[in-house]
Image (tube, helix red, strand yellow):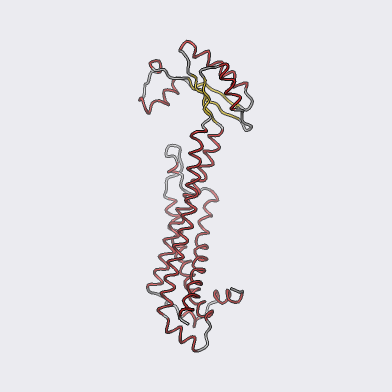
Amino acid sequence: MNRGTIRSYFIGDAQADRVVPPSGFTARLTLFAAGAMAFLAVFALALSLAAGRLADRWASELARSATLRITAPADQMAAQTEVALTILRQTPGVARARALSPQEQAGLLAPWFGPGLDLATLPVPQLIEVTEDETGYDAAGLRLRLAAEVPGAVLDDHTRWRRPLVEAATSLRRIGWISIALIGGTMAAMISLAAHAALAANAQVIEVLRLVGARDVYIASAFVRRFTIRALIGAVLGTGLGMGGVLLLPAASDEGGFLTGLGFQGLGWLWPLLIPILGALVAFAATWAAARSRLKELT
């Protein structure tokens, strides 16, 4: 399309606009499709952004923590724990190393064994919490030194279960963006159907307009304008309802986990404002393609 064609689509013409029925099935279908798709797009966008925040947080938090597990006879446990703590504090890249108290370890086992667990009755290993600094430490070298000086020590840097969690959150974010693309495609298909129906219903009017010299661009512009405005109105309403629904979601909390952090945060509230604009652009492209195709069939 050249600049003059695009301009003719957006500059209103009272006579041309009469070609498109102001109400009826096609108007209701366009408004409903745009509103429903915009409503769903808000939640898909919220899910995608929340999943992205979750992936970033898990990647940063879990990457800086590790656990050292010491398994030894009861009479050697304290000595091996002290040696392990000394090694960790001497290791470049380790910001902090702390042995968990019996109460903390009992708290970790409480979900499985219940409260009031007596660790003296169970062969529970000693856990040491390791936090690395920004530079990080050499895990392979640390394992070799621990194996030589603390035979019962096993370093778990959480790599085995950190990677699947981050990948799952990243996949969820990807699914959110794919959902938005599918929502846009569905909206385009429904608006195309509505435009085809409106063009077919006005076939006789279109024929008369052609007889008096109206060009196809003139006729198509009426449909493009009307359907784009309808889609914009529906998308604004759907986006407003969607953002209201997101506001009603529970705020993020550690107790609720991921399911309480699905809302937008900070400048993220500006992202849904793009949905009506994108919806109008989708409606414009879909109606233009439908109008050009249908007018060729009516030739």
188 relative position to 111: left or right: right
Q: Foreground residue, 250 or 49?
A: 49
152 lies above or below 164: above
219 lies above or below 258: below
Question: x%, y% of residue 138?
Answer: 61, 28
Residue at 46% in and 13% down? 73
Figure quadrant of residue 37: bottom left
Q: Residue furthest top?
A: 75
46 lies above or below 211: above
Q: Residue furthest bottom?
A: 212
199 lies above or below 47: below
Residue at 40% in and 15% down? 120
Question: x%, y% of residue 55?
Answer: 51, 42
Residue at 50% in and 33% down? 160
Q: How many marks?
A: 0
246 relative position to 140: left or right: left
**In the rendered view of the protein, which quadrant contains the N terminus?**
bottom right
Q: Foreground residue, 293 or 47?
A: 293
